[in-house]
Amino acid sequence: MIGLLNTILCIYFVPVAKEPYSWLCTYLICAFILSARTSKKYIASGMVLGCFNTIWVVLFYSFKFHEFASHHLDVNQWVSAQKDLPASVRNLIVIKSFMTFVSGILPGTFALVITSVKNQLR
């Protein structure tokens, strides 16, 4: 649900240049939650989280594409440069899907590091 909230924030408020930092904060929050609620298999849990996150990120970006483009001038210019609007929407969806799925590894890795640090401090 944190990823869904961040998706909404990125569509309406967060500039594209700041979006990676927003997602990094989201992944860190998810990592703290994963490290507290799972005992093992942090990377696998992060990948499952990434898969679910991919679904709602892609759905929201595809349904709210025009709002996203209207709030982000650089995306709007990129879309204007494309000859075919459905192709540009499809390209954005493919890019977002790949980025979100690959970044599913991050929360699990962060959770593994957080748990290791917590265990070292005990």
Image: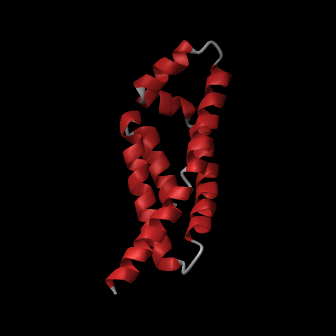
Give residue 35's position: percent from left, percent from top: 47, 74
Residue most extreme to the left: 121
Quadrant housing residue 105: bottom right
Does residue 39 sit above or below 2 in this rendering?
below
Does residue 78 sit above or below 71 in this rendering?
above
Quadrant housing residue 64: top right
Q: Residue at x 41, y 52 (%)?
A: 24
Residue most extreme to the bottom: 122
What's the colour scheme? Answer: secondary structure
| Quadrant (top left/top right/bottom left/bottom right) for the C terminus | bottom left
Does residue 12 sit above or below 3 in this rendering?
above
Number of disc labels: 0
Does residue 22 sit above or below 79 in this rendering?
below
Towards the viewer: 118 or 36: 118
Give residue 57's position: percent from left, percent from top: 57, 47
Query: Is residue 86 found left or right of 102 in the rendered image?
Result: right
Q: Residue at x 58, y 54 (%)?
A: 53
Q: Residue at x 37, y 75 (%)?
A: 117
Towards the viewer: 28 or 105: 105
Give residue 96's position: percent from left, percent from top: 57, 40
Give residue 59's position: percent from left, percent from top: 63, 44
Quadrant housing residue 65: top right
Q: Residue at x 44, y 42 (%)?
A: 10
